[in-house]
Amino acid sequence: MTLSSHLAKLGGMTSRAESAAATRRALLDAAGELLDLGGPEAVTLREVGGRVGMTRGAPYRHFADKEALLIAVGTQAWERLADTVRTLRSDPAIPPADKLRGALIALVDIGRRRPHLFRLMFTDLPSDPTALYRAAQPSHDDFVAILLDLVGERNAQRYGALLIASVTGIAGMEVADHLKGEKWNTSAEELVDTLVTLIANAEK
């Protein structure tokens, strides 16, 4: 989406802060598109600026360098995942096991739809190695809270690590098309269902 499209959404007169926010969103959208097309190597501030119709140096007013831009893209992905997990957690009508399944499938879905973004989310970038770890914390906290309701405090952290490690592997195998066919003949959804069932039944 171009910068003009983002500004058009605001309509009418826009403040400097609104214009800056719209510009930042446009740059992040463009960076995400380039990331999807060619991985981190394809993301440059020059290409991102050109994609939204800005001058070559304009993106540097919003991001110090390429890594700052990639961190912002990864942070945005974690924030969106956190919104999904928080919505699941706060819905009293959804059983704990289904909340857990929904949270795991949401993560798998990023891996299968946007594999480069998925890998970026778990990357420690040299300029700020803990930036994406910090960005992941809200979704982690809600995810563990869901697990607490299902398995109790003693096992929540251990099972959480097991589940995230398993889901990253599941996403990778699905992207590589290794789950279908005669070798495994399964799907990401079936594997997540199995994990959730095993953990839920282990506590009964």
Image (cartoon, rainbow, N blue to C red):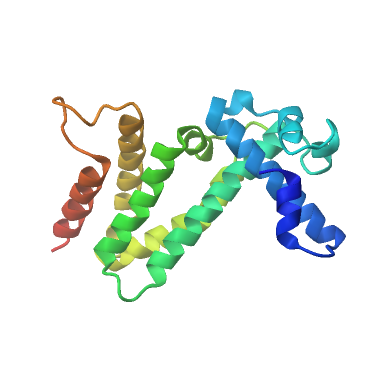
**Nearer-the-camera pick, 108 or 27:** 27
> Would you say residue 114 is visible in this rendering?
yes
Q: Give the number of callouts.
A: 0
Q: Is residue 73 left or right of residue 58?
A: left
Q: Quadrant of the image for the C terminus?
A: bottom left
Q: Is residue 128 visible?
A: no
In the displayed structure, would residue 161 be above or below residue 47? below
Q: Quadrant of residue 2?
A: top right
Q: Position of residue 96 (x, y in %)?
A: 28, 66
Q: Is residue 141 left or right of residue 130?
A: left
Identified at 79% across, 44% down, the residue is 62
Most extreme residue toward the bottom is 92
Q: Position of residue 88 (x, y in %)?
A: 38, 65
In percent of width and height, residue 45 lies at: 74, 31
The image quadrant where one finds the N terminus is: top right
Which residue is found at the position 56% from the left and 25% from the top? 38
Tell which of 174 and 99 is nearer to you.
Answer: 174
- Residue 103's image quarter? bottom left
* Left or right: residue 94 compared with residue 40: left
Q: Looking at the picture, does residue 200 appear above or below residue 130? A: below
Residue 125 on image: x %, y %: 61, 33
Which residue is drawn at the image coordinates 29% and 51% (left, top)? 159
| Residue at 33% across, 34% down | 169
